[in-house]
Image: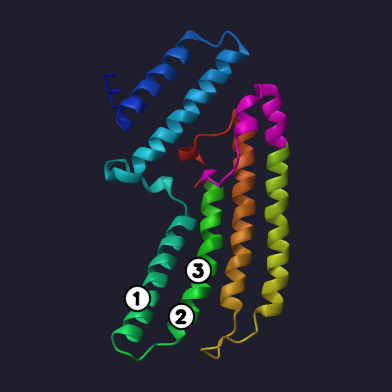
Amino acid sequence: APHPRPTVTNEQLVNVLKATIDTGAAAGLASPQDAEALGVARARLATAEAAGYADDLRKFRWRDYGPEDWVGLVLLWAMASFVFTQFFSRYVLNDSVAWTEEVSRYLLMVLTFVGAAGAVRRGTHIRVEVLEQALPLPARRVLWAILDAGRLAFWVFGAVVGFDLADRMGEMPMDSFRQGLGWVYWPIFLGFVAMSIREAQWIWRRWRHGDAPNTQQVIA
């Protein structure tokens, strides 16, 4: 029977990658291939460290989280509270608090765009990396430039459209309250503005370092 493969913990993987990076940096980079291999090791180290932060509170650091994360956390708990209130009042008390359902929907809309800004900050939006990983470093830099310009243009376009939408929809009243929907659409506009700013910071760091930055070191 085949022997089971030994299990490598995330902490062991981090230590191995750190040793590899230190050895490569001390030996010097003899070729572009060495530089690319060192960049891959650093990217894997960032991923491994990020995975460790998820379930190890000893790794908690305030600087790893931006304002978007804390705003999103507050919105998430507020939305969860309203959803629970709606469920409890409808199915337990048989007397539904109607406004909680509408407010929860709007909070979800705001949370989506606030969370998207946090994802831009970390560079963790879903994307296909097959072509990126297959290209040599010079061609990869050209691809990065195209992708960076495309993403930044999209976020700026979203901010322009969001401003126009917020300006036109801000006075439209909610169904449950005599309150305009500006508090919903203006945060969406600000979410696109935050995405544009974070994308510009990401691009600056990428071209300053010559490679994709460590996701744990993106400016907070």
Residue 102: x and y in percent read: 50, 80
Q: Residue at x 40, y 71 (%)?
A: 78
Give the labeled residue for mark 2.
Answer: 101
Q: Secondary structure under badge 3?
A: helix
Q: Is residue 117 left or right of residue 157?
A: left
Provide the residue designation for mark 1.
Answer: 84
> In the image, 217: left or right of 36?
left
Q: Is residue 61 above or below residue 170?
A: above
Spatial CA distance of label 2 from label 1 is 10 Å
CA neighbours of label 1 inside 10 A, class few (<14), some (14 to 19), many (20+): some
Q: Secondary structure at mark 2?
A: helix
Quadrant of the image occupied by residue 164 = bottom right
Q: Does residue 141 belong to the magenta stretch?
A: yes
**Residue type at numbered disc 1:** Phe
Position of 155 relative to 127 (above/below): below
Taking the image as shown, residue 188 lies to the left or right of residue 162, namely left
Looking at the rendered structure, the secondary structure element under dot 1 is: helix
Who comes first in sequence, dot 1 or dot 3? 1
In the rendered view, tell whether residue 48 sits above or below residue 120: above
What's under tag 3, amino acid-wise? Leu
**Residue at image x 56%, y 46%?**
126
Q: Residues within 10 Å of mark 3 (few under 14, many from 20)?
A: some
Of pointers 2 and 3, the one earlier in the residue sequence:
2
Q: Which residue is mark 3?
A: 108
